[in-house]
Image (cartoon, grey):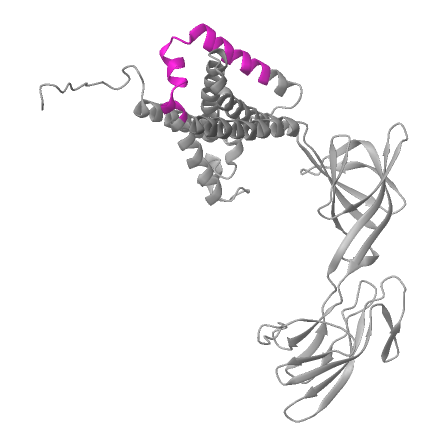
Amino acid sequence: MSNNTTQIRRNLWDAPWGYVESFFIGIGLMLTGFFLEISSSGSLDFTVSYPYNLYFLLGYVGFLLILYFGFRNTQVVRWLTKVPASISSIVLITFLVMIMGIVPQIPSENNIITNLGLNKITSNWAFLLVLFQFLTCLGLITIKRIVQFKTENIGFILNHLGLFLALVAGMLGTGDLQRLSLNTFENKHSWVATDINNKEVELPFAVYLNEFLIEEYNPKLALIDNVSGEVVENDGKNLYLINKDEDYIYKNYQVNVEKFHTSSGRIGDRYMPVSDIGSPPSAYLSVKNIENDSIVKGWISCGSFAHPYQSLKLDSKYSFVMTIPEAKKFSSDIDIVSKEGDKTKTVLEVNKPYKYNGWKLYQLSYNEKMGKWSKLSVIELVRDPWLPVIYTGIFMMIAGAFYMFWVGNKITKN
């Protein structure tokens, strides 16, 4: 070794702490979290609702301010404001998120997965403790940059403060998030919904269903194996939308739709157009066997809750059937009635939610057994009061990124 080279030897836990110490602390927090999961059998759950989550946030911010202004010269706080502490926590959070992507986040019969809480990572104590370390690093670094304010640090502050707000609001907001299901019936007021545990929740408003509407595609034609009951493969085109006067080819059969009714009823040995509730679609087919020129004719119908289905048997091997029509579009014409009696009229459609006093109303489902005659509309109601805080954090990060890009370009040009 050259005489001009000085070798510095540093023992573990000597100041300043680096990556080795940071990963020791992070892994220790993660193992502590898994121990809490095992010892509590998953019964410990960090979920707080308003106003306690707001108190927690204010207390946590106060704690960070006291740490920085009162103890910023201590080894722990100096370490928390350095890169190794942040990088180690990010790596461990990424590791836990990877587990979340591998292990289904649903109840599991595997005792190891259940005891360690690997099927509920976002509420797992290991994840929460590592996230707490990362947020503490993030908060202290942001306070440090704000105190040592410089114009060129504006982008950094916006990015880090925005990320802090988004993560904290996302974590604390779970206690106030409400996701409810409301069954509404035509010409009736509904104001009592149910949560994921089927617990009844009274709403601050009522929903009156004026009418539930469904638009359907035409039913489809399928060739069925009489023995297995499965749809017969037909060169990749196994199902055809039924339309009058259309011709279809199934294996050795040429099918022509001579008659088609979107709503019908059986009268004797034939189907006639009928518009009664429960009247299913029907079609009259002419099926020609291309090999021997034999022809079989008859009616098919998918049936409904009020009428049986009807198939056309070609021989001992195959039959033609009609599938149940698929919904093209369904919507609910509703009135939202406040406790004061004020009415708000709207139409709910799939993927087109309506916002009302902090709630989002979604068209969810209906009575599929009744189909287009359903008098029931199921509406999902979602309320997340912390969402504006999350959006604020995201917009701050975007603004910070734009600012740093603008400053970077300015410096490059100079």
Say which quarter of the image contains residue 295: bottom right
Horizontal arrangement in the rendering, residue 198 relative to residue 205 (left or right): left
The location of residue 69, given as percent across then percent down, is 47, 7
Residue 88 counted in the magenta span: no
Q: Main secondary structure of the magenta part?
A: helix
At x 71%, y 38%, the residue is 198
At x 66%, y 81%, the residue is 249
The location of residue 319, given as percent across then percent down, is 68, 79
Q: Residue furthest front?
A: 414
349 up-or-down from 165: above or below: below
Horizontal arrangement in the rendering, residue 307 relative to residue 390 (left or right): right
The location of residue 59, given as percent across then percent down, is 57, 13
Horizontal arrangement in the rendering, residue 299 relative to residue 273 (left or right): left
Q: Can you say which quadrant of the picture contains the C terminus? A: top left
Residue 71 counted in the magenta span: yes
Horizontal arrangement in the rendering, residue 32 relative to residue 352 (left or right): left
Q: Nearer the viewer, residue 257 or 106?
A: 257
- Residue extent of the magenta highlight: 57-86
Q: Nearer the viewer, residue 369 or 409?
A: 409
At x 66%, y 31%, the residue is 177
